[in-house]
Amino acid sequence: MTELTAPKSPLTANEFADEIRQALKYTQGVTPEQAKTADVYVATATVVRRHLMDSWMKTQQDMINGDTKAVGYLSAEFLMGKQLRNALLNAGLTPQFEEAVRGLGFDPQAVVDAEYEPGLGNGGLGRLAACFIDSLASLGVPAFGYGIQYKYGIFRQEFDDEGRQIERPDYWLSNEDPWGHIDYERDQRVNFGGKVVEENGKRVWKPSWAVRAIPVDYMVPGYASGRVNTLRLWQARSYDEFDLLTFNKSEYLDAVKPQVKAEDISKVLYPEDSTEVGKELRLEQQYFFASASIHDAIRVFYPDTDKPDLTTFADKITFQLNDTHPVIGIPELMRIMIDEYGYDWDTAWEVTHKTFNYTCHTLLPEALEVWPASLIGKLLPRHLEIIERINKQFVSELEAKGASEDQIKRMLILTDDEHPVVRMAYLATYAGSNVNGVAELHSQLLKDVTLRDFSDVYPAKFKNVTNGVTPRRFIKLANPRLSELITEGLGTDKWLEDLDLLEGLAPLAQDDEFVKKFAAVKHENKVAFADFSKQRYGAELDANTMFDTMIKRLHEYKRQALKILEIIATYSDIKSGKVNVQDITPRTYIFGAKAAPGYYLAKMTIQLINNVAKVIDNDPDVNGKIKIFFPWNYNIEVAQMLIPATELDEQISQAGKEASGTSNMKFALNGALTVGTLDGANVEIRERVGADNFFLFGMTVDEVEKMYEQGYDPSKYYEADPRLKAAIDMVADGTFSNGDRNTYAPLVSDWLTKDWFMTLADFSAYHDIQADIDALYADQLEWNRKAILNVANSGYFSSDRSIKDYLDRIWHTRSLDK
Ligand SMILES: *Cc1c(COP(=O)(O)O)cnc(C)c1O
């Protein structure tokens, strides 16, 4: 007997349908007969939101009235994905929704699809924030996500006829956003510019312009917790007074300029991933949301008073800084306490120190975010003074601890050279209570390399919290067929709240009947993805081939180039007759990736993949054997379709470069086998699922380091492996550019002379392991046994576990209900 614990609302389908009719009438002004699918979506969202309202209000009340410290997750990105199915699941309304909407004459899936996916993040970092706030709510921990409601999210990607990436603006707010509630009454003023003057012995900031931060609240319903938290995203608006004070006909431009500038702040998400952009507007964005969020927390936790006792602030809320983007919040809290509330430095420091913790996502010391002190001085002059004083205090502390002059110089928060910069990661590491990496290997590298001096002086600050993903979105919603099979296999659906229960599937890997059911689920998911690809992209995929997938931002360190070179080598082997086409294991190679608009080599790699795809499609010699499919505009929706359909997952970054990765976790939990390097969380995945159930290849971190020291010469590898040589020659000779040898010349030249991420050095090992992959794939029963063991042993990678680690190691708080 299967024990079901999924939340169920007592609402009947008929009542649900009635409420949708009401919402259609009173918010959309249409009858069900006049309604379009999108109207039904908006009406349904309105109804679901209403049903969450009591839980949301009670969660707020319990948080403010109780003594459970809340979590403020400060993140410049929240890559949420579509909300409707998630909200229905967590509210226990899915069956009623399906029946009600059908009764109204609409297709439930079409209603769900009518939602426009908000793209308020680039990739892993933003998705992590989304998984974390889902888990916080599901665990009943009071929390706020704090970020920016960008008007334009990550660009919409298209490909032109030459296979090049085209970026289209993503004006997502030109669609209905029924989930966001704008709260004009709870706005915050965020000041910029001006100067600091001395008044009555005090430093007083006289800003020259200000922006109005208006919160847009999104409910974050927990699964089976009865709790609903808040994602508060700030929108920047100008103050009307600017227009009124300065507006007259001749000064029209002066009047609109501040308005345009103010609204620019929340206009666009920077489409960068893994590289920092030192733009003034970016710093304005960072301060904008950090300042508004801290003021908001003070408003929330000290209602009904102008004189809050901020010495208790760190007992009310703990702020987690998701990378360095919100680190300017540290001097901001100091400034608020000292300038706005009159506390002395030491009191402000103690509270600030206790309140903040920092998650570092970076590996290379030179990739850590810095801001010119001159820019901070111009935009935030008072903050620069505070940072100077923090730096001074820091240097004294280091001297007292006996640090050498050299070490102190290396560690300066504010550098002392000709063009001083503020190192945001150093500021966060010194000022905050804890700093954590995002996987075991990464946290170790933080201590040994990235923040080594800091770990010498402050070893106790350094923690690890391995990333995770929410099983609600990435198993239950993405993979309903597997979810049903898991529930059947375990006899309970409790695994959605306690993912360690998946271990119970391990014995079933030896049960041939179960393995066949598992294989059938995978096949159905492949067929479903092929249908989706046909409809959405006009692609013809064969669900009887191996689905071999690489989805993630396009970046040199992630090494999509390694994958495409290996495909080309296979193609070349067939063309040259070295390999009999009959001996090939048919594969469909699937890519999904956006490249930053200014990232030349990454964009060229996209172009190459698209053109290899074209050449292969037009070549009858390999038809039905190898195929490349590159759906444009990879996003959460595509991820949810593709991950459950994937059999082989590519996690082939250069060892030491991927901090954690989270798509690796999503794949393992959906029963794909991984081919990967010893990098990021791959290491922990392999430990857990077992070395026999993971295709490991490539250099280790130590080997990579040694190679850099020795001096790396990629051309040696090109000469040594004829398969690699043939592949690169094919790119160089115009095979994939209608004979034009110039098209990919910069890419080829980079491979042969630089190849910073050692794609060529890892090529042979990567090519060799393909035979092992094919051999196992030939035995479908064995393959699927291993796939089941991947699912069974990946429960650790639930973001619920990550959040519990944060609660124990860093936040020291708990569920409202414990
Ligand atoms: C999980 C996810 C990512 C992160 O992928 P990595 O391979 O870990 O870099 C990026 N984008 C989307 C849409 C995701 O769902």
Image: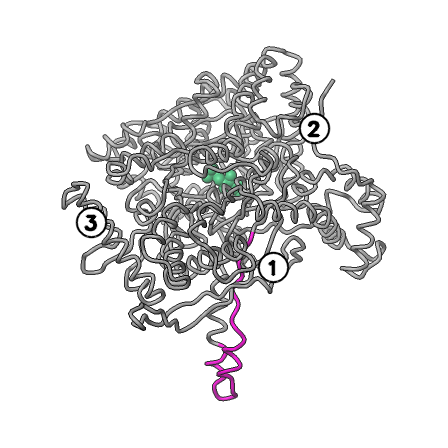
**Local crowd at mark 2 within 10 Å, few (<14), some, or many (≥20)?**
few
Dominant secondary structure (helix, strand or loop) of the stretch shown in magenta: helix
Marks 3 and 1, how far apart at CA: 50 Å
Secondary structure beneath dot 1 equals helix
Looking at the rendered structure, which numbered label has been put on residue 396? 3
Please state which of the two labelled residues, at mark 2 or mark 1, is closer to the viewer.
2
Type of amino acid at the residue the image marks with label 3: Ser
Give the mark, 3 or 1, whose residue is nearer the N terminus. 1
- Residue 771 percent across, percent down from the top left: 45, 20
Residue 355 sits above or below residue 695 on the image: below
Q: From the image, tell me which residue sits under label 1.
A: 173
Q: Amino acid at mark 1?
A: Leu
Asked whether mark 3 and ligand 1 are closer than 8 Å, the reply comes as no
What percent of the width, then of the height, locates residue 778? 54, 17
- The verdict on residue 249 being magenta is yes
Taking the spot 47% from the left edge, 49% from the top edge, the residue there is 75
Residue at image mark 2: 5
Decide: few, some or many residues near mark 3? Use Cα within 10 Å; few <14, some 14-19, many ≥20: some
Looking at the picture, tell me which residue is in the foreground, 423 or 126: 423
The magenta segment is 232-256
Asked which secondary structure carries label 2, the reply is loop
